Image (spheres, rainbow, N blue to C red):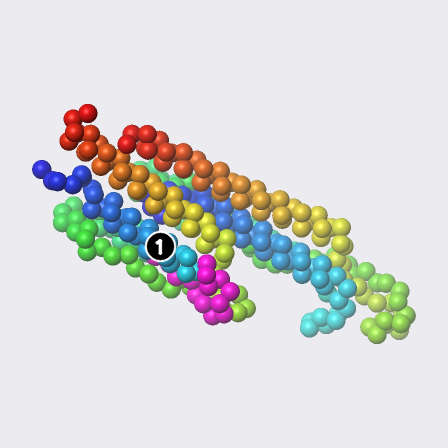
């Protein structure tokens, strides 16, 4: 009964929690920078997005082996990428960053999309928590079976 | 005939490891915002598996869990690498493992008690 092999479902759920938490951070960053026209790299802020990838566990599926686990590792964040879509140009003659035609290049952040992503991340976080909670309840019931013998 | 039920040494050693692991995990959770803090982990399962593989002389009393500084996860900007979600899940796992082991010990002693009292 290993700490990491018997209860591997918790590792998988916690990887989901970590990934969704990072997605929420990226969404919050996008929303906060939705009107930023000056970035350290120069130019307007470009919207960022997270890319997830699936992980395999450390012990591949081997029913005869000492660590009998499914071999799944949950999810990992492959990276944070910039949205390559076009930056909108808005007419705002008085703006300090306006070009000679009076247009300002604004970030390509669309608030409704960010809010939907935020809701998605929240629900996914809750779903992962629920999965871990259910697994915990299952194990408590298994332990309770032993309790009946004493 | 041994006085204590079989594998009592192993079970009590495993319970000790879960107790120590709880302290280490609670320490990590308490320091989740401390700048420069690296989380600690307990290594025991691998050494136990290696020891059990040997045919003779299963000297379980000598096996000790090792607390080490875990640098496997990346640092945040303040130098802290504690992931609150993972530590909470590990606490949950440890609690279940502890309950399972204690329940096994309890059932074993109950069986002994029944066979002593004859009912």
Image: A98 above or below B86: below
Q: Position of residue B78 (x, y in %)?
A: 53, 69
Which image quarter: residue B98? top left
* Magenta stretch, residue numbers: B29-42
The chain to which mark 1 is attached is B
Q: Does the magenta portion include A5?
A: no
Prevalent SS, magenta region = loop
Q: Is residue A80 visible?
A: yes
Q: Which residue is mark 1?
A: B21
Q: Is residue A32 left or right of residue B117?
A: right
Q: Is residue A42 left or right of residue B37?
A: right
| Residue that appears at 62% across and 58% down | A25
Which image quarter: residue A110? bottom right
Q: Is residue A82 left or right of residue B28?
A: right
In the rendered image, the quadrant that contains the C terminus of chain A is top left
Q: Does the magenta portion include B38?
A: yes
| Residue that appears at 19% across and 53% down | B61
Q: Residue furthest left?
A: B1
| Residue that appears at 45% across and 54% down | B87
């Amino acid at each position: 009964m290993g700490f990491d092999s018997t209860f591997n479902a918790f590792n998988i759920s916690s990887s989901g929690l970590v990934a969704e938490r990072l997605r929420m951070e990226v969404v919050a960053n996008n929303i906060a920078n939705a009107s930023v026209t000056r970035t350290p790299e120069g130019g307007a802020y470009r919207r960022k997005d997270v890319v997830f990838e699936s992980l395999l566990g450390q012990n591949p599926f081997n029913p005869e082996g000492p660590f009998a686990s499914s071999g799944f590792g949950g999810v990992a964040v492959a990276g944070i990428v910039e949205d390559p879509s076009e930056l909108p140009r808005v007419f705002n003659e008085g703006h300090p960053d306006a070009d000679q035609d009076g247009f300002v290049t604004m970030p390509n952040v669309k608030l409704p999309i960010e809010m939907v992503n935020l809701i998605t991340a929240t629900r996914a976080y809750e779903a992962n928590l629920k999965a871990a909670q259910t697994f915990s309840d299952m194990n408590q019931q298994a332990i309770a079976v032993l309790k009946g013998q004493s | 005939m041994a006085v204590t039920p079989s594998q009592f040494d192993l079970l009590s050693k495993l319970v000790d490891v879960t107790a120590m692991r709880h302290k280490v995990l609670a320490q990590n959770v308490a320091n989740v915002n401390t700048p420069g803090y690296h989380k600690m982990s307990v290594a025991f399962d691998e050494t136990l598996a290696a020891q059990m593989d040997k045919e003779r002389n299963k000297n379980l009393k000598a096996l000790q869990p090792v607390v080490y500084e875990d640098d496997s996860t990346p640092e945040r900007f303040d130098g802290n690498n504690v992931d609150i979600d993972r530590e909470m899940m590990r606490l949950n796992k440890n609690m279940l493992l502890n309950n399972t082991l204690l329940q096994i010990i309890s059932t074993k002693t109950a069986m002994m008690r029944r066979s002593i009292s004859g009912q």
